[in-house]
Amino acid sequence: MFKVIKSCLSGYTMTRTLFNLHYENYRIEGKVLDAGAKSRYINYYDYLNHEEADITFTDLKKNEKGFIAMDFEKLLPIDPDEFDYVLLMNVLEHVYNHKRFLGELNRILKKEGKLVGFVPFLIGFHADPGDFYRYTHSCLEKLLFETGFNQVKITLIGEGSLLCISDLMLFYFPKHKYFFFLRPLSWVLSAILYIINSFMFYIGKGMNTKTKMAYLGVAFEAKK
């Protein structure tokens, strides 16, 4: 709980906070493709255990030295069975031809290779360069099976209506310089809502049911 509160008070959204912590100490190794990384210093690498990973970074443009420019709307210029892991963090919602893209990721993975990723569910429009989809957990699971993956594991991130309210509140607060002083208040309120949400789930009165779920995003892991 302390890590979440500290992150919230540092100005991170609840989605980013819980997404990062979900992958804390998650081990990737061998040849890894980070598909759509904005930077080799993006903050989920502060949490992943990647000491034994040989990472290839790709994005639509060559953001940094060593990056490979790649258009995910087209067939990937990569040989089959090339990678042990593919990371797909906050990218899939930006790819219109998502089924073909997932099929391509399956193709370039070695046998028993893993696709590991995350998609936001509650987030504003954020074109990069496009913004096309919001995936439910059931849709994402179906997509992964249909594109050749198996042993699919889906994890809801940020369960609870209060956590969703927390991020909606952060999105609402204006970023204009005359209102910037309000943002620290939203960070404090976000931390408080997390504490209340955790307590409600602890005593068995969480806001979610099997058919009516509120969550911020979906983490997924699938094996070829």
Image (cartoon, helix red, strand yellow):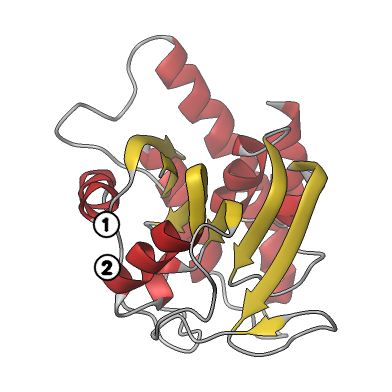
Q: What secondary structure is marked by label 2?
A: helix
Quadrant of the drawing holding the C terminus: top left
Image coordinates for residue 29, horizontal then vertical, percent: 72, 42
**Residue sitting at 40 percent across and 86 percent down?**
74
Rendering quarter of residue 5: top right
Gap in angstroms between the C-alphas marked 2 and 1: 7 Å
Which residue corresponds to mark 2? 99
Image position of 132 (left or right of 197): left
Q: Name the residue under label 1.
A: 147
Closer to us: 9 or 97: 97
Label 2 vs 1, first from the N-terminus = 2
Quarter of the image that includes the N terminus = top right
**Secondary structure found at label 1:** loop
Q: Which residue is drawn at 50% across and 84% down?
A: 128
> What type is the residue that disc 2 sits on?
Lys
Left or right side of 60 for 183: right
Please report contact status of discs 2 and 1: CB closer than 8 Å, yes or no.
yes
In this orientation, which residue lies closer to the viewer: 16 or 70? Answer: 70
Percent x, y of residue 185 = 68, 55
Q: Position of residue 154 (x, y in %)?
A: 37, 37
With respect to residue 129, does 198 lie above or below?
A: above
